[in-house]
């Protein structure tokens, strides 16, 4: 069963487990807004799975640019 929580509740859980965390509430909201962390809208509320958040923070995606957006590379124009 997923542990769906509000963004603010996830932030509080992170602070309880690690009081010196560098993750901020604004940072969590930004990750949800750009789609890095999947979310579900319920009315005006935005719910995220706390376990998926922990997984994202434990295993962040690589910052390697993909071929289409690589700087200094020749790319085809369509």
Image (cartoon, grey):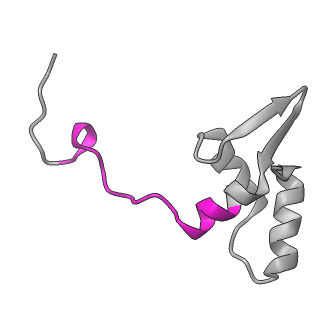
For the C terminus, the image quarter is top left
Q: Nearer the viewer, residue 25 or 1?
A: 1
Residue that extends furthest to the top in the rendered view of this protein: 78
Residue 20 on the magenta span: no
Residue sitting at x 82%, y 42%: 47
Residue 59 on the magenta span: yes
Instruction: Name the side, left or right, on which 9 lies relative to 51.
Output: right
Query: Relative to 40, does residue 3 appear above or below in the rendering?
Result: below
Residue sitting at x 46%, y 58%: 61
Instruction: Name the side, left or right, on which 7 lies relative to 36.
Output: right
Q: Where's residue 36, x and y in %?
A: 58, 46
Residue 54 falls in which quadrant of the image? bottom right
Query: Relative to 67, does residue 3 appear above or below in the rendering?
Result: below
Residue 15 falls in which quadrant of the image? bottom right
Instruction: Name the side, left or right, on which 48 lies relative to 38.
Output: right
Residue 26 falls in which quadrant of the image? bottom right
Query: Relative to 28, does residue 67 appear above or below in the rendering?
Result: above
Q: Where's residue 34, x and y in %?
A: 59, 40
Instruction: Name the side, left or right, on which 56 lies relative to 68.
Output: right
Q: Where's residue 17, x and y in %?
A: 82, 78
Query: Relative to 77, does residue 15 appear above or below in the rendering?
Result: below
Q: Nearer the viewer, residue 29 or 57?
A: 57
Residue sitting at x 78%, y 57%: 50
Q: Where's residue 22, x and y in %?
A: 68, 74
Numbered range of the magenta stretch: 54-71
Number of numbered callouts drawn: 0
Residue that extends furthest to the front in the rendered view of this protein: 1
Residue sitting at x 78%, y 81%: 18
């Amino acid at each position: 069963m997923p542990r769906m929580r509000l963004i603010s509740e996830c932030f509080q859980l992170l602070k309880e487990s690690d009081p010196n965390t560098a993750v901020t509430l604004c940072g969590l909201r930004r990750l949800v807004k750009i789609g890095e962390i999947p979310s579900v809208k319920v009315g005006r509320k935005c719910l995220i799975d706390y376990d998926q958040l922990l997984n994202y923070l434990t295993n962040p995606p690589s910052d390697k640019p993909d071929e289409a957006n690589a700087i200094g590379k020749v790319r085809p124009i369509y």
